Amino acid sequence: MEKILDSLLSLSTENEIVEFKEAKNQYSKDKLGQYFSALSNEANLADKGKAWLVFGVKDNKTVVGTDITDKQLNEFKTEIVQHTSPRSSFINVHKVEKDGKTILMLEIPPAPQGQPLSWKGHCYGRDGESLGALLSDEYDRIKAQNISKDWSAETIESASISDLSEEAIAQARIQYKSKKPSLVNEIDEWTNDVFLNKAKITIQGKITNTAILLLGKPESEHFINPATSQITWILKDGDNLEKDYEHFTCPLLLNVDKIYNKIRNLKYRYIKDGTLFPEEVDQYDPYIIREALNNCIAHQDYTLGSKIVVVENENASLTFANAGSFIPQSVEKVIKADAPEPHYRNKFLTDAMVNLNMIDTIGSGIKRMFTIQRNKYFPLPDYNLAQNKVQVKIIGKVLDPNYARKLAQIPDLSLEEIILLDKVVKNNELTDIEIKTLKAKKLIEGRKPNFHISSKVASATNQKEDYINLKGLDNDYIQKIITDYLERFGSAMRSDLENVLMNKLSEGLDDSQKINKIKNNLQSLRNKGIIEVKGKIWKMSK
């Protein structure tokens, strides 16, 4: 390890797979995670077996040593495992003595083939010595590593057409006719062998994994083992306790309707602005259920052996989850592009599902889901792309009778900007680009990570009280409260002033941040010579 360290120190500059940090006695866990993601992705792209993050060395290669403890290292490892997707960790952490000083060499694995490694949902990369978002072409290069191998197109030599459901084949013919109306008469003349080839479900008469998934008899599922066709529907009550469940397997072409019929799609009534007549809508638009469920089937990573899960909660929410990373870089990118994704994990399967009228590949499905929810004044779909899975939550009711409805009335506010404001309201993390976008249009205020809606949005949505609660008091007003208190009562300990001010500060701050704000304002008044402190007692200056 000493020789490896010397070789790293001999580099003329840091590069995409080597990073030096002084880290004298501590280091930010979040920044560590960003570098882990970046170095892991760059090691993949460079076809290297590892990357290095070295603690105890300055950028200019000066060895200063580090006092980071084993306890801190264990905390680092826990954070990395919890917040990387797909889950990862250090290959090893090496302690090396150099010039009488302790150096920590964190050995980082390359991102898995075909799966860019993210930290808290964001993929990072390097451009020389600079840390930033993984470039789009680099992201696509990693994603394309597994595209050449399409699990859904693999054939099963031991399977035959007798392993497919006759009922499912008959339904497949009906769906294919609706997709190809000009061939209706011709399709009726085709044998099942010819039809399955034409519909791109089999390959030259050979049964594919796709054929088993969509049309296979339930007992034929073993042909795709260790993959599974299973979809589990779970019903939970208001306390999130399981009340009912059912497992569904192939043929999925038939069973998606059975799953749909399990979901209790009740009517929801609410009154729109400007009328006394109630609006009555389905809690869940049928298109959204169809799109979310079929997307799970189409984009599941079957090589992971996981099942698809649909959770229905009596509190009016549906959650759909499938295994595998989200191939586009982000949901926002899909909505902005509004075009087909150039790469699909299961291209043969998606082509077959298009031919059977289960999905389309024009790229507008997710955007339409957002638009449907927006037009009903329901919360927008909430995507979670962590831990190597895709999870989308659909809420079937109005959470805030005023917010979403009036938000849509702000002039020139795009769907993309509404989605970002929806993230602010949900306290979801924003990227630097998203922050810049919202601040440029003066839609948010505050400092990272404590953002809140701006006065512009608050005024348009009649949320002035919420705005004041989130923004909190200006420093001038805080200092006036402090001086008024000291003039009235003569003196105070800091704890007295904290008791007065804590509930007046922004609800977007936690307690430690509020205490720091009070401390900073006291110091500001002291520096101006307005107040003074003796021991622990604050008084007005004489």
Image: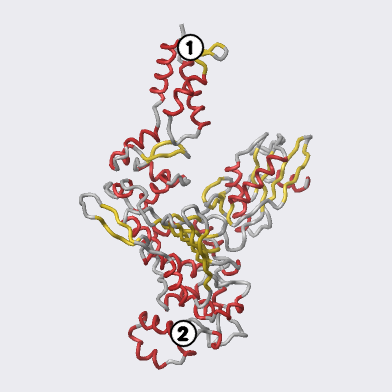
Residue 290 percent coordinates (x, y): 41, 68
x, y percent for residue 43: 63, 55
Residue 6 seen by the camera: no
Amino acid type, callout 1: Ser
Total label count? Answer: 2
Q: Which residue is at the far top?
A: 542
Which kind of residue does numbered mark 2 sit on?
A: Glu
Q: Is residue 514 above or below residue 298?
A: above
For this view, does 371 lie left or right of residue 221? left
Q: Nearer the viewer, residue 347 or 287?
A: 287
**Circle 2 Cα neighbour tier, 10 Å, few/some/many (<14 / 14–19 / ≥20):** few
Quickly name the residue at label 2: 167
Gap in angstroms between the C-alphas marked 1 and 2: 85 Å
Q: Nearer the viewer, residue 401 or 45?
A: 401
- Callout 1 touching callout 2 (CB < 8 Å): no
Q: Residue at x 42, y 59 (%)?
A: 334
Can I make out residue 435 in this image?
yes
Question: In the figure, is residue 182 to the left or right of 8?
Answer: left
Give x and y (percent) for residue 537: 53, 13
Residue 39 is left or right of residue 486, and the answer is right
Residue furthest front as drawn: 243
Relative height, residue 242 to residue 191 (above, below): above
Label 1 sits on residue: 491
- Can you give x and y, in whole percent of width and height, for residue 63 in the image? 71, 36
The crowd level at tag 1 (other Cα within 10 Å; few <14, some 14-19, many 20+) is some
